[in-house]
Image: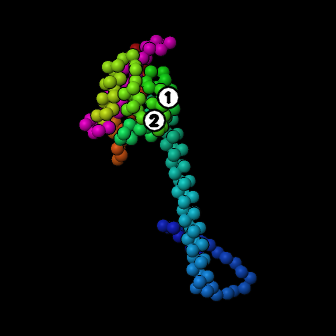
Amino acid sequence: IPLVAGRPRGALTFGVGTERDWSSGMQARLDLVAEVFANLLARKQSEDALRTNELMKTGILDSLPSGVMVLDKHGQILDVNDTWKRIARESGLPDGEGIVPGGNLLDACASSNGTDGSRADELFAGLRQVLNGTESHFTMDFSSGSVSGVRWWQIGIVPLNRHQGAVITQTETTERRS
């Protein structure tokens, strides 16, 4: 019996000691069993492909030297790479709920009490403009103090292609300024 769910997935065979004809009722039940197996195989293959794609995406994002954050149209964080988490802590960007998937960056920016409110306001405004489609991109350079001295950063915000949302990158530019 062919296992078909969208496309051929295999075959289901039964062996008996003697040849026999299957009744139409039995054939219908076997076809149903084959359909269930085919759908289970298709689901498993889809889940495996999705898991492989997720691992690939995560691997790519985590191998980038820049921090990357992906937002939906409401500012909800869909994904953050490890570099973003590290850089955000080092550069004084909102921490905790503001930088984890499920958090909302617009809310974090609105409640931020950074030492340079005008820069936070500029970032917040640029993010909103990209999210609502009034700007095609936003870039901002800023500095932050650390134990090792002043560090420079560049934030870039672009729309998320084919989706409503945005991709934010944060890159250290200290060496370029030296």
Q: Main secondary structure of the magenta part?
A: strand
Q: Which is more toward the observer, 150 or 109? A: 109
User: Residue lying farthest left?
Assistant: 134
Rendered image quadrant of residue 110:
top left
Which numbered disc, 1 or 2, marks the residue that appears first in the sequence?
Answer: 1
- The amino acid sitting under disc 2 is Gly
Q: Residue 29's x, y, as percent?
A: 59, 78
Q: Secondary structure at mark 2?
A: loop
Mark 1: amino acid: Gly
Image-based side of 152 in relation to 20, left or right: left
Question: Which residue sits at x=40%, y=19%?
Answer: 114
Residue 141 falls left or right of residue 33: left
For the residue labelled by badge 1, is the local secondary structure a helix, a strand or a loop? helix
Q: Which residues are magenta?
A: 131-157
Question: Would residue 70 be visible to someone looking at this image?
Answer: no
Residue 33 visible at all: yes
* Image point (28%, 34%), residue name: 129
Q: In the figure, is residue 77 to the left or right of 32? A: left
Q: Residues within 10 Å of mark 2 (few under 14, many from 20)?
A: some
Asked if residue 122 lies in the magenta stretch, the reply is no
Q: Residue at x 29, y 38 (%)?
A: 132
Q: Position of residue 33 (x, y in %)?
A: 60, 72
Q: Which residue is mark 2?
A: 103
Tell me, yes or no, whether the two marked residues, 1 and 2, touch with CB atoms within 8 Å. yes
Above or below 166: residue 172: above
Name the residue carrying label 1.
96
Q: Residue at x 52, y 57 (%)?
A: 46
Query: Which percent across, then down, holds residue 119?
Result: 34, 21
In the picture as drawn, the residue positioned furthest to the front comes out as 111
Q: Residues within 10 Å of mark 1 (few under 14, many from 20)?
A: few
The quarter in which the C terminus is drawn is top left
Q: Quadrant of residue 170?
A: top left
